[in-house]
Image (spheres, helix red, strand yellow):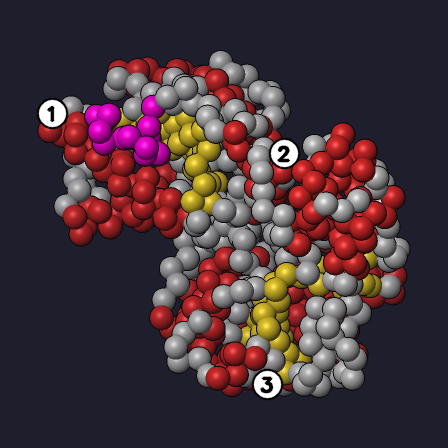
């Protein structure tokens, strides 16, 4: 690619390290875009320019490609460029990073199948120019197969550009913690966290392969250019560690710091833990708004290990926050009081507003009362994980609560649950022969046969998915009763995009938006609780939030919208930090236990889900460390500005 085409672009060459004062903690070039869509459009445009330039020179371009949800919007933009702007892939040679070991190429979760579903089947790349590690090779031939993969990359002229994602352990490809900087293509045992993250795709962690074939870190680092993409708040901590931390084999992505043409391309949510955004006063002058002052004081309190009201001038100066005092011309004590009051005012045992109270310093207004409250949950367990205690409070305080599950969640229900149900029905039918049970027996047998025919990893037929959805509905109603909700206060939208798709391959449509819009117009809520705003854009949670945001912001939305507050909660996403919280709802030990009981109603929950209430205890502990009242647990919320 010519210098004129890459100037100031994502694929721009250079030392790889950031150059401005604000970015001085970053050891690799990091570009932040408002969202993944804009980032992927820019990257795809530059890749298209590279492809066309090589075509004009009668040369090939060699791309290293990644799988997972992260690159999906990038692939969709490449497909659009091919279909609408005539971009041809005839001179493109591709090498994929990795493949699960033991999965056939037609397996729905094989990366061979994924790449064809997401890209190759929609562009004109010749089949012989596509290379994906072979996960079906005999164990005794794995070593030779990996060596041959390395030879093919070298024979193609090496990788011109390697596209990467990043896992929660900081892995690139499947280079789990412990992978050396000079490692090559090989078989590797998958980390426990990696397998847990893939559990939903495989309908349970027990079904996730334990091994994979992956390009090595050394193979990746030989690429002439590298772009690592990361979206959503769940990736923010590992992005910071890879970009600002030390190079270490514990985080294989950190080795990109040594590459001269590597760049991290991230959205706003994934960048939130970088020092320039999280602690901007450490890298340059800031506008000391009330929010910024509060954030700095909370940070200083944590750093010094002191309650807010015990901080002194010397603490500010020694920690690099002396500019805050200088900008206000106030002593630390007054700044401390202002910040303490702001944090204290976030605490409210009245998430729907306290009737008859002065709400000047309360998160939620006092009127009207009772309020029409709409609580949206992408999948059934999300809301109980994120705000089970607050649900109970809203009901206890007399509000009209409607709990709406946007999708059935049937993809999270394992085969064992459906099989157990069918066997119970079959056994009851056997015990009641001649008593009108023939239809039930036939149904149970059809479920058992369908599960047998699809095998351990196949896609569920509609009959099985419906049953799994019904099983989850029963669990959801049981969990709702733990939070004072009656069955008629619980609704299931079963949005079509979910029923027609699989994780990381969802395709939302107008009918999904219409379903959300209809429920909004029916209830006309005074308050909405929603989640998914900071998730990976291909996740079910993020898609459900975007559908809500589009319906809520539509011109067709009624006048009720102007008086409706939207509060965001975190379900399976990363918890809010103390300075981000705008409403903190305390929970007693009994309420926390009640929340745990509601979560345990779901057989499909994993260890992370069941232990999620510990995050509520951590938030309470942070508030206590700041010098505020000590609570058993706290559920946290932020107000959304559409």
Q: Position of residue 7 (x, y in %)?
A: 28, 30
Q: Secondary structure at mark 1?
A: loop
Identified at 81% across, 37% down, the residue is 313
Q: CA distance from mark 2 to mark 3?
A: 75 Å
Q: What label sits on residue 58 in the rendered view? A: 1
Q: Are marks 1 and 2 in contact (CB under 8 Å)?
A: no
Q: Are marks 2 and 3 in contact (CB under 8 Å)?
A: no
Query: For numbered disc 3, what is the local secondary structure?
Result: loop
Asked whether 7 falls inside the magenta stretch, the response is: yes
Q: Which residues are magenta?
A: 1-13
In this rendering, which labeled residue sits more in front, label 1 or label 3? 1
Confirm whether residue 174 shows in the render: no
Mark 1 → mark 2, Cα distance in angstroms: 50 Å
Give the left or right position of residue 171, taking residue 138 as reference: right
Q: Is residue 35 left or right of residue 324?
A: left
Question: Considering only order in the chain, which callout, 3 or 2, is on the residue closer to the N terminus?
Answer: 2
Residue count near mark 1 (Cα–Cα under 10 Å), binned few <14, some 14–19, many ≥20: few
Residue 5 magenta-drawn? yes
Residue 262 figure quarter: top left
Q: Residue at x 27, y 44 (%)?
A: 78
For marks 1 and 3, give the CA distance.
Answer: 74 Å
Residue, disc 3: 436
Q: Is residue 441 above or below residue 464?
A: below
Main secondary structure along the magenta-highlighted residues: loop
Badge nearest the viewer, 1 or 2:
2
Q: Counting residues from the N terminus, which is met first, the one under dot 1 or under dot 3?
A: 1
Could you tell me which residue is drawn at 40 percent across and 32 percent down? 227
Mark on residue 282?
A: 2
Asked whether disc 1 touches disc 3, contact meaning CB atoms under 8 Å apart, the reply is: no
- Specify the label residue 593 is tagged with: none
Label 2 secondary element: helix
């Amino acid at each position: 690619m010519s210098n004129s085409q890459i100037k100031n672009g994502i694929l721009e060459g250079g030392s790889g390290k950031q150059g401005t004062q604000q970015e001085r903690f970053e050891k690799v070039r990091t570009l932040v875009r408002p969202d993944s869509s804009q980032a992927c459009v820019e990257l795809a445009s530059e890749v298209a320019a590279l492809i066309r330039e090589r075509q004009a020179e009668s040369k090939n371009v060699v791309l290293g490609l990644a799988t997972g949800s992260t690159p999906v919007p990038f692939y969709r933009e490449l497909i659009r460029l091919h279909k609408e702007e005539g971009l041809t892939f005839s001179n493109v040679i591709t090498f994929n990073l990795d493949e699960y070991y033991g999965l056939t190429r037609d397996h729905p979760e094989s990366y061979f199948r994924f790449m064809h579903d997401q890209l190759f089947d929609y562009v004109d790349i010749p089949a012989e120019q596509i290379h994906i590690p072979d996960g079906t090779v005999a164990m005794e031939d794995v070593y030779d197969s990996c060596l041959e993969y390395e030879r093919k990359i070298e024979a193609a002229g090496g990788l011109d550009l390697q596209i990467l994602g990043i896992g929660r352990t900081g892995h690139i490809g499947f280079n789990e913690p412990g992978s050396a900087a000079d490692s090559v293509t090989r078989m590797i045992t998958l980390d426990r966290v990696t397998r847990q993250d893939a559990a939903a795709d495989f309908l349970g962690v027990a079904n996730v392969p334990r091994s994979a074939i992956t390009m090595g870190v050394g193979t990746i680092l030989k690429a002439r250019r590298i772009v690592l993409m990361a979206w959503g708040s769940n990736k923010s901590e590992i992005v910071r560690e890879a970009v600002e931390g030390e190079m270490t084999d514990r985080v294989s992505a950190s080795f990109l710091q040594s590459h001269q043409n590597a760049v991290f391309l991230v959205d706003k949510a994934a960048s939130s833990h970088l020092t320039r955004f999280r602690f901007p006063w450490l890298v340059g002058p800031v506008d000391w708004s009330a929010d910024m002052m509060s954030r700095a004081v909370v940070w200083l309190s944590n750093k010094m290990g002191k309650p807010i009201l015990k901080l002194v001038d010397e603490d500010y100066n020694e920690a690099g926050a002396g500019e805050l005092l200088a900008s206000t011309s106030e002593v630390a004590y007054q700044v401390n009081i202002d910040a303490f009051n702001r944090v204290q005012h976030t605490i409210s045992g009245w998430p729907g507003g306290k009737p008859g109270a002065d709400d000047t310093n309360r998160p939620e207004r006092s009127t009207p009362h009772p309020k029409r409250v709409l609580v949206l949950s992408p999948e059934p367990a999300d809301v109980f994980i994120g705000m089970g205690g607050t649900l109970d409070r809203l009901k206890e305080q007399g509000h009209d609560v409607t709990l709406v599950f946007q999708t059935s969640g049937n993809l999270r229900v394992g085969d064992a649950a459906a099989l157990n149900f069918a066997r119970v029905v079959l056994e009851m039918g056997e015990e009641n022969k001649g008593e009108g049970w023939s239809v039930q027996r036939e149904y149970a047998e059809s479920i058992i046969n369908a599960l047998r025919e699809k095998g351990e990893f196949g896609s569920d037929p509609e009959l099985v998915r419906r049953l799994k959805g019904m099983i989850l509905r029963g669990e959801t109603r049981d969990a709702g009763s733990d939070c004072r909700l009656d069955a008629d206060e619980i609704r299931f939208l079963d949005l079509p995009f979910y029923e027609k798709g699989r994780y990381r391959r969802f395709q939302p449509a107008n009918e999904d938006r219409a379903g959300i819009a209809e429920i909004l117009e029916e209830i006309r809520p005074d308050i909405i609780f929603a989640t998914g705003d900071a998730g990976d854009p291909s996740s079910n949670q993020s898609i459900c939030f975007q559908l809500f945001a589009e319906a809520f912001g539509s011109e067709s939305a009624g006048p009720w919208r102007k008086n409706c507050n939207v509060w965001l909660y975190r379900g399976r996403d990363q918890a809010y930090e103390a300075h981000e919280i705008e409403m903190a709802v305390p929970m007693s030990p009994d309420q926390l236990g009640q929340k745990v009981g509601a979560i345990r109603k779901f057989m499909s929950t994993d260890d992370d889900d069941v232990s999620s209430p510990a995050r509520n205890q951590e938030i309470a502990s942070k508030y206590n460390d700041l010098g505020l009242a000590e609570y058993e647990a706290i559920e946290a919320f932020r107000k959304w500005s559409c």
